């Protein structure tokens, strides 16, 4: 992923075990989404912002051995990991989404998950304005080729505490990389507009939901802890002292009120898929 804004929307210190955990956590949902794409058998595609290559390899399975997928990412660490033990029809290389080297009309499809997050570069974003990246995708797609942009779009992780969760979601961390003063057109939920302005046709948007139910396995527990930190770990200044104390109590594994120990726990998260055809 392009200095990956991973799970859901913040870049954190590179830790391969975290990326593996977060990828495994989302595998069920991503499998459903990828299957719904009906990518052509034996086609050639690009995973733009492939990260550790977890889903690149899954996509390759859907298009068969006669197809091929190139995974590109700006991170050498990600590419080095992804390049280990990959399938014969999967290739990984370093590259910048702002200046992709591929020829015009080269790919049958492009998949980009949690990557084209517009925002400041110091938050790990590839660009503040996504226009050039999307136009670059258009250039390298074959006529009739499909673009698939996927973004984390919402979550409910604190059942029983809607007011506290709503307050937490007013923080910069919960909305990053979108920051105050940014052009609303550059918010990811306006990705259909990006596609339209770049020449894509037959635009669509669909939101997919993944439910989380107790009992929670170790991968899910670790992933939710990572989300608590990435989304809300820096939210103290947005809450009253009592609200912050309550959040820390609910989110600490050492607390007797740790919310993930609830035997009836239920939460969910969503991803929104934006598609267009060249």
Image (cartoon, rainbow, N blue to C red):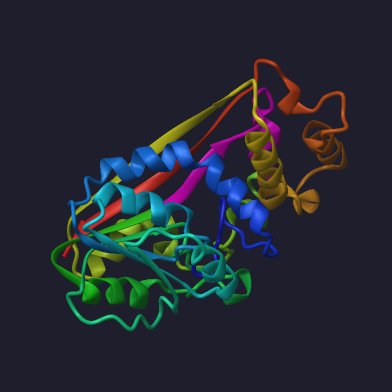
Q: Is residue 207 visible?
A: no
- Say whether residue 257 is left or right of residue 159: right
Most foreground residue, 208 or 172 = 208
Q: Is residue 165 magenta?
A: yes
x then y, percent, for residue 129? 43, 74
Q: Is residue 59 visible?
A: yes
Question: Looking at the image, which residue is at 25% across and 51% down?
Answer: 64
**Based on the displayed image, in which of its 4 quarters is residue 69 positioned?**
bottom left
The count of marks equals: 0
Question: Looking at the image, which residue is at 67% across and 64% down?
Answer: 14
- Say whether residue 84 is left or right of residue 104: right
x then y, percent, for residue 29? 43, 38
Q: Of all residues shown, which one is farthest toward the top?
A: 264
Most foreground residue, 233 or 15 = 15
Question: Looking at the image, which residue is at 34% across and 48% down?
Answer: 273
Q: Of all residues shown, which one is farthest toward the left?
A: 143
Q: Which residues are magenta?
A: 151-168
x then y, percent, for residue 192? 29, 57
**Based on the displayed image, in which of its 4 quarters is residue 196 positioned?**
bottom left
x then y, percent, for residue 66? 21, 58
Most foreground residue, 48 or 94 = 94
Q: Is residue 97 magenta?
A: no
Dividing the image into 4 quarters, which one contains the C terminus? bottom left
| Residue 274 versus residue 121 in the image, above or below | above
| Residue 208 versus residue 98 in the image, above or below | above
- Say whether residue 162 is left or right of residue 117: right
């Amino acid at each position: 992923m392009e200095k990956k804004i991973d799970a859901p929307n913040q870049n954190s210190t590179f830790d391969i075990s975290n990326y593996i955990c977060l990828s495994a956590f989302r595998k069920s949902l991503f499998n459903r989404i990828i299957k719904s794409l009906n990518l052509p058998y034996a086609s050639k595609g690009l995973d733009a912002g492939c990260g550790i290559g977890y889903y690149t390899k899954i996509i390759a399975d859907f298009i068969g051995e006669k197809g091929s997928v190139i995974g590109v990412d700006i991170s050498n660490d990600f590419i080095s990991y992804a390049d280990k033990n990959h399938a014969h029809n999967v290739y990984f290389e370093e590259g910048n989404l702002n200046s992709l080297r591929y020829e015009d009309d080269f790919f049958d499809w492009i998949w980009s998950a949690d990557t084209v997050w517009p925002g400041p570069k110091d938050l790990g974003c590839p660009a503040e304005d996504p226009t050039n990246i999307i136009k670059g995708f258009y250039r390298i797609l074959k006529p009739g080729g499909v673009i698939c942009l996927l973004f984390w779009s919402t979550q409910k992780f604190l059942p029983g505490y809607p007011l506290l969760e709503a307050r937490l979601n007013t923080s910069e961390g919960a909305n990053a990389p979108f920051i105050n003063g940014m052009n609303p057109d550059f918010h990811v939920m306006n990705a259909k507009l990006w596609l339209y302005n770049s020449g894509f046709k037959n635009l669509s948007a669909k939101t997919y939901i993944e439910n989380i139910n107790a009992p929670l396995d170790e991968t899910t527990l670790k992933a939710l802890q990572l989300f608590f930190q990435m989304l809300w770990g820096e939210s103290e200044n947005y809450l009253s002292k009592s609200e912050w104390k309550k959040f820390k109590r609910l989110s600490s594994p050492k607390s007797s009120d740790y919310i993930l120990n609830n035997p009836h726990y239920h939460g969910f998260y969503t991803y929104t898929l934006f598609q267009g055809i060249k």
